[in-house]
Image (cartoon, grey):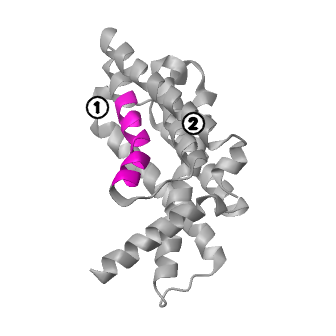
Amino acid sequence: MTFGESVGLSDDQERYTVRILQGALIGLIAYGAVTARFSVSVTAAIALGVTVLPALLRREYGYSMDAGLVLWITGAVFLHSLGSIGIYAQYPWYDEITHTVSSIVVAGIGYASFRAFELHSDDIDVPPAFRSVFIVVFVLAVGVLWEVFEYALGDLVPVYGVDDIVTDFVFNGIGGLAVAIWGAGHVGGLIGFFRERLRSNADQ
């Protein structure tokens, strides 16, 4: 089952929703600039950049990502950007939701990459249980890199303290566990794309 089938919308509806969310991100960039809340603009600009990556993959490599997966990615970064206008500070549970949603996306991409390497090489034969462990560890590792990135940006991105970081990791782990337990069949197309790229690079 693809992400699109899980969402229950047609491909056209999913693409239309993505465009709406991208427009909302542009609105957040403008809002941050007008109100001198540059952390809002920076966060929304990064999110907007993430949402155009599927289009770049299609243009550069001819790979059309599942529309539902594109919507999930766009929704995840939009929720994170929306929180920067003050929702994170006012409603602590909102941060928990955004990290869980985002970590599911990260876990799916990590699993797709790992599985592509496994299928590409005859020397790699990984037990299913280890794949589950890898998914969780991968999500937590990306979480560490993200926290470092936030600190590196300084005042451009708000950081809410050590307690918030610990909570982020807990819910990152929950998202990773969700993918590990209920499966990563939603990213089958992405696995095929990564595997094809590995094959192409090996033939060069």
Q: Is residue 67 left or right of residue 157?
A: right
Q: Amino acid at mark 2?
A: Thr
Does residue 74 appear to the left or right of 183 in the view shown?
A: left
87 within the magenta span: no
152 sits to left or right of 80? left
Nearest to the eye among marks 1 and 2: give it.
2
Residue carrying label 1: 154
Helix or strand or loop: what does disc 1 sit on?
Answer: helix
Q: Residue at x 49, y 90 (%)?
A: 122
Q: Residue at x 39, y 28 (%)?
A: 44
Quick one: 114 or 132, which is closer to the camera? Answer: 114
Q: Amino acid at mark 1?
A: Gly
For the residue carrying disc 1, how many other residues have a C-alpha within 10 Å: few (<14), some (14-19), or many (20+)?
few
Image coords of residue 126 (percent x, y): 57, 82
The magenta span reads: 44-59
Mark 2 sits on what residue? 98
